Amino acid sequence: EAWSNMSHLPRLNVVLLGHHQSGKSTLAGHLSCLKREFTVNPNGLPFKQISDYTANEISCGHSVNTSYLRCDASEVFQIMVMDAPSKFPRAAVHAISQADVAVIVVSSVKGEYEESLVPHTGTTWQHLILARAFGIKDLIVCVNKMAHDSVNYSPDNLKLVRDQIFP
C-alpha cells in the first residue's frame, strides 16, 4: 500500500475548518481520492460520504465525528486530512489541537459566508480564533461554491469574501 511506502516522510496534519454546509466534507473526499485511479467515489456515493460515512451523518446531512483521511498527493509529506465537524465544538477542538496547517473552507454563496463570519457566533470566525489559540501559523483559505448560480465565478464575490476574512 502507498501509505506504508511513505513511512519515512514527515507527517503533515491538515484540518478542514469552517461553517457547516461550506463543503468541508466534500473537499476532504476529493483530497483523499487524489492520485488514485478513480475520479468519483468508487461506491457511487457523493464525495462527502467518503468523510461522512456513518448512518447518523448521512441521515442528518452533516459531520458528527472528525474524519481522518489520508491524501496520497504529496511526495514530500504523509498528509492526514482531518474533517472537523462544525456543529460539535469538542470534536473540532480535538482536530485543531492535532493540526499543523488549517484550511478554512468558506462558502461564496451570499448569506452563507456572512453567517459563518459573524463575530463571536459564526462558526468560521470561531474556528479562526481556535486555530490561532492552538498556535497554527499556516492558514489556507478555500473559497468554495464559486460555481453556484448566485456567484457564477464572480471576481467581485471572491474579493468580498476575501475582504471579510482579511479586513
Image (spheres, rainbow, N blue to C red):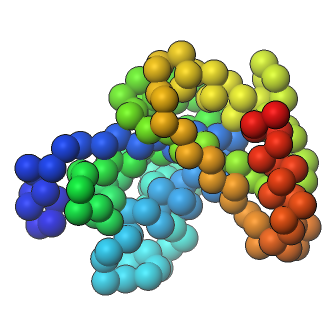
Residue 84: % across, % down = 51, 38
Nearer to the camera, 137 or 108: 137
Relative to residue 34, is residue 106 depicted above or below?
above
The residue positioned 68% from the left and 25% from the top of the image is: 126
Q: Is residue 162 left or right of residue 127?
A: right
Q: Which residue is drawn at the image coordinates 37% and 83% (left, top)?
A: 38
Q: Does residue 151 appear left or right of residue 18 in this picture?
A: right
Spot occupied by residue 75 in the image (x, y as percentages of width and height):
23, 62
Is residue 56 something that shows in the picture? no
Task: Please state if 10 lies on the left or on the right of 62 as rendered.
Answer: left
Residue occupying the point 48% across, 56% down = 28
Residue 154 image offset from top left, x and y in percent? 86, 68
Q: Position of residue 88 (x, y in %)?
A: 58, 29
One can see residue 127 in this view: yes
State left or right for residue 117 relative to residue 89. right
Q: How many marks?
A: 0
Residue shown at 54% from the left, 70% from the top: 46
Quadrant holding the C terminus: top right
Q: Nearer the viewer, residue 93 or 167?
A: 167
Is residue 159 depicted above or below 167 in this figure? Answer: below
Tell me where residue 108 sits by quadrant: bottom right
- Quarter of the N terminus within the rendering: bottom left
